[in-house]
Image (tube, rainbow, N blue to C red):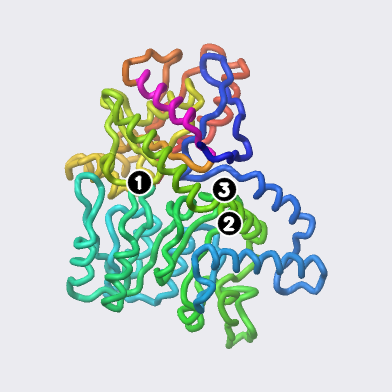
Amino acid sequence: MELPVSLVGDGDLVPCVDGEWRRYVALDSAASTGALASVMQKVADFVPSYSSVHRGAGYKSHVATAQYEAARAAALDFAGRRDRDDVAIICRNTTEAINHLAYRLELRADDVVVTTVIEHHANLLPWSRVATCRYVECGAEGTFTLDDVVAALDAEPAPRLLTVSGASNITGWMPPVSRIIEEAHARGIRVVVDAAQLAPHRPLPPDADFVVWSAHKMYAPFGAGVLIGPRSVFARGEPFLAGGGAVDFVALDEVLWTAPPEREEAGSPNVVGAVALHAAIDAMSSIGWTGIIEHDRRIARRLREGLAAIPGVRVLGPGRDVETLPVATFVLDEMPFALVAARLSAEFAIGVRHGCFCAHPYLTRLLALGDEEVARSREHIRHGDRSSMPGAIRASGGLNTRGEDVDALLDAVARLARGLAPPVAYLRDATGDFFPDLSASPDSPLARAWEAHSRGVGGSCSPG
């Protein structure tokens, strides 16, 4: 039985290069999901009462403040933190949350932060800017063991912090986070969990010291992210952002910062994003983790096993005996990854992601690229040519993914792998992306639609 969940826009028709309009198959949930209908309704109901929060005397300000703080409380509940003296800070997204935390922990350049090579750039770059990173390596299947993490924790000098993804955005693999946290805490080391991929699929780890995630990956695409951690960490020192709402008193030579979490949320907050996040949490709670996990497992198995069975297709990451989220990243032996993605979109109306998925170190390991290959790509990119950038194709599902969506992808990939001739030529530019060549009929509605929404804004996946 599949979950009876649909998102706003499910069933929409999009143009294909053969002139037909086909139902859009959304298989890019690991990047961003569509919106739940209940989230859109909650936002629509709230917007007439939208007003400034915390500092307005009007009735609508009181309503908006109550809704905003209710969302904060819901985030704490979702993370299993209501019984601890933690705060939930509403940010733009996971990336901002990690940058925020990296600043607030007041790390020094010689402090060691243990992290892993499987991380998204958002959980690599902020730490390497402020501290010395020690990396846990992965094996050929893109996984590491608890012993690998323990070895990094026990190396000298002792680390100040461990930060790890709850699930990979490339392979969907879930490290043994609970046991990792236990080992780190036994050594007095705090743990950050990047739960951006995990949050829509599994309960958040309640024992992590800090946890971060984004609403746009859990059916509330209104630009809110969450940073949760001990109140004491944010009660001292200067906030990441300085401005109105973060202070109790300001003179030209003095500032008294207010208490957290308001101390960390300078400026007008994203109230609509917080309301949407709350609605998404309520919707997921109504479905329940049992149903969500069963659905994920069914889609993951169908997706990964189906792709692996297609001759000429190589699925990256762990084998079928390792549980993953409904994410499958793959390559075709005889076709550039960017062309596969372009053809899936232009000919079959299937939306996937391609490129390096903002996790370059991990993907180069999964692709088993040598140092010379990586160096050659780097030099080309330095000169503005991304066409040799390594990459792969990623299909990822969510609550609204149906078996027939997976089957549509498998059928299309199998046809491409067998050498299906394209109905039109595809042009490649310096970004490395491919676009259907519709120059033979430039004034057709189809050509105008593709030109307006693809090449006009450049390469879709070349940066990362």
Q: Which residue is mark 1?
A: 324
- Prevailing secondary structure class for the magenta stretch in the rendered image: helix
Could you give the CA–CA distance between mark 2 and mark 1, rounded to whole angstroms?
A: 22 Å
- Say which mark, if any, is on residue 154: none
Could you give the CA–CA distance between mark 1 and mark 3, rounded to whole angstroms?
A: 20 Å
Neighbour class for label 2 at 10 Å: few (<14), some, many (≥20)? many
Q: Secondary structure at mark 1?
A: loop
Mark whose residue sits in front, 3 or 2: 2
Q: Which residue is mark 2?
A: 281
Q: Amino acid at mark 3?
A: Tyr
Q: Secondary structure at mark 3?
A: loop
Q: Residue shown at 38%/26% (left/top)?
A: 339
Q: Residue shown at 54%/32% (left/top)?
A: 456
Measured from the top left, where is residue 397 in percent x and y?
46, 40
Nearest the viewer among 322 and 422 is 322
Mark whose residue sits in front, 1 or 3: 1
Residue contact between numbered discs 3 and 2, judged by CB atoms under 8 Å: no
Q: Secondary structure at mark 2?
A: helix
Q: Amino acid at mark 2?
A: Ile
Q: Which residue is mark 3?
A: 219
Q: Residue shown at 27%/71% (left/top)?
A: 112
Neighbour class for label 1 at 10 Å: few (<14), some, many (≥20)? many
Q: Earlier in the sequence, mark 1 or mark 3?
A: 3
Q: Earlier in the sequence, mark 2 or mark 1?
A: 2
Measured from the top left, where is residue 85 in percent x and y?
51, 79
Quadrant assignment, res 36: top right
Neighbour class for label 3 at 10 Å: few (<14), some, many (≥20)? many
Nearest the viewer among 463 and 188 is 188
Measured from the top left, where is residue 310 in percent x and y?
30, 25
Magenta region: which residues? 400-416
